[in-house]
């Protein structure tokens, strides 16, 4: 199974259903993210994409949280999403979009981790 996803496909298939057997710690973070907490949106998105923090790996579901957090200018989300696009391992490589996101993180928020 190929983990590469494109943003358009993710947005067209938004509303990927959450697994029913998530641990309560995961559910707590998801509840905060669903209420618009940008740090939680980043955490949940990252955790699903990487299969970390007791979340199952689910790139499509992770992007449903990560992209809106990045678009809302959460710096951690911008750094991570920009690096995913730059590396092209999980998402298709998109250097132009990656540079846009990372440049904004550096110039607007002085992010040291967004410098490539």
Image (cartoon, helix red, strand yellow):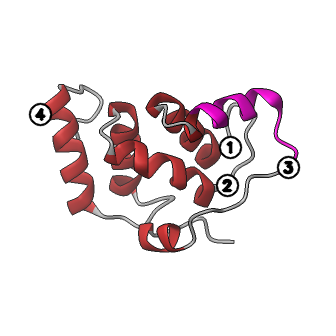
On screen, residue 10 above or below 23:
below
Q: Are marks 1 and 3 in contact (CB under 8 Å)?
A: no
Badge 4 marks a residue whose secondary structure is helix
Q: CA distance from mark 1 to mark 3?
A: 16 Å
Extent of the magenta region:
20-32
Residues at discs 3 and 2 in contact (Cβ within 8 Å): no
- The answer to if 35 sits in the magenta stretch is no
Q: Earlier in the sequence, mark 3 or mark 4?
A: 3
Name the mark on residue 78: none
Asked if marks 4 and 2 touch (Cβ < 8 Å), the reply is: no
Please tell me which residue is depicted at 66% across the width and 62% down the height of the picture. 16
Q: Residues within 10 Å of mark 1 (few under 14, many from 20)?
A: some
Please identify the quadrant where the C terminus is shown.
top left
Distance, label 4 to label 1, CA atoms, is 31 Å
Mark 4 and mark 2: span between their CA atoms?
Answer: 31 Å
Label 2: element kind: loop
Residue at 42% across / 51% down in the picture? 67
> How far is the residue under mark 1 from the one under mark 2?
7 Å
Mark 4 — residue? Answer: 107
How far apart are labels 3 and 2 at the CA level? 13 Å
Q: Position of residue 107 (x, y in %)?
A: 11, 34
Q: Which residue is identified by label 1?
A: 51
Q: Which residue is mark 3?
A: 20
Q: To which residue does mark 2 refer? A: 58
């Amino acid at each position: 199974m190929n983990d590469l996803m494109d943003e358009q496909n993710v947005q067209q298939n938004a509303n990927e259903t959450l697994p029913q057997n998530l641990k309560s710690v995961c559910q707590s973070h998801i509840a905060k993210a669903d209420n618009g907490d940008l740090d939680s949106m980043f955490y949940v998105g990252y955790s699903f994409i990487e299969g970390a923090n007791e979340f199952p790996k689910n790139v499509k579901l992770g992007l449903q949280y990560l992209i809106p957090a990045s678009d809302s200018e959460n710096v951690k989300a911008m750094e991570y999403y920009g690096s995913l696009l730059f590396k092209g391992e999980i998402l298709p490589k998109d250097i132009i979009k990656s540079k846009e996101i990372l440049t904004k993180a550096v110039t607007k928020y002085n992010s040291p981790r967004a410098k490539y």
